[in-house]
Image: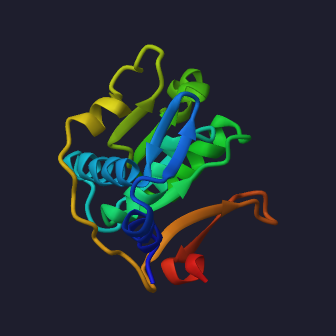
Amino acid sequence: MYITQGLKRAIQVNANGIATIDGDQIYTWKQFGVRVAKLAAALQQLGLCKDSRVAILSMNGSHYLETYYAVPWADGILVPLNIRLAPTELRYMLNDGGVEYLIIDDAFREMLPTLIAGTNSLKQILYVGTGEVPQGAIPYEEAISNASPACDAERGGNQVAGIFYTGGTTGTPKGVMLSHDNIMS
């Protein structure tokens, strides 16, 4: 089993049905699938390879769901970050998880300089928003529009799908690795 199976099936049986509604932006399953494949390609063009970690720090929106599918589509591992944590806690997770790519939205733009100061492995930031693009970041929509759809890596089974951080009894967050089979079950 693999996470992207559900998306492919939705496209197959209901291509013109509504997949997401985010404000005035509405995507059908077919449109959503193309966006996922293009985001996966954009990440690969930025250097994402097998097992690269992609973190997302964002409020809910269609871009969050696109990321959820695009990362395994590109053969990567998703690291969702808790929006309620302090920058130092989030930075710990970025470093501990070996995160190379960060997708961040408007809500956390002001936190970005503090968040990334002292990160070890971060290579690129994609910015989702309408505000001024942070220095060194790539606009999310521009990355998608400039990419051609990638083929699904069909990452699945016992391969790691995501690293989910929990509060530990020691006070230091622990990264729990869940496989595609774990999540699909």
- Figure check: 4 above or below 95: below
Left or right of residue 98: residue 85 = right
Give the mark count: 0
Rendered-image quadrant of the N terminus: bottom left
Residue 63, how many percent across, how many down? 48, 42
Q: Outermost residue, right direction?
A: 169
Residue 181, how many percent across, how many down? 52, 83
Residue 119 in sight: no
Residue at the spot 43% in from the left edge and 14% down from the top edge: 132
Residue at the spot 43% in from the left edge and 59% down from the top edge: 69
Left or right of residue 15: residue 45 = left
Residue 12 in which image quadrant:
bottom left
- Figure check: 66 above or below 136: below
Residue at the spot 23% in from the left edge and 53% down from the top edge: 44
Residue 53 in which image quadrant:
bottom left
Residue 102 in which image quadrant:
top left
- Figure check: 135 above or below 22: above
Residue 4, how many percent across, how many down? 42, 69
- Nearer-the-camera pick, 25 or 14: 14
Residue at the spot 24% in from the left edge and 51% down from the top edge: 41
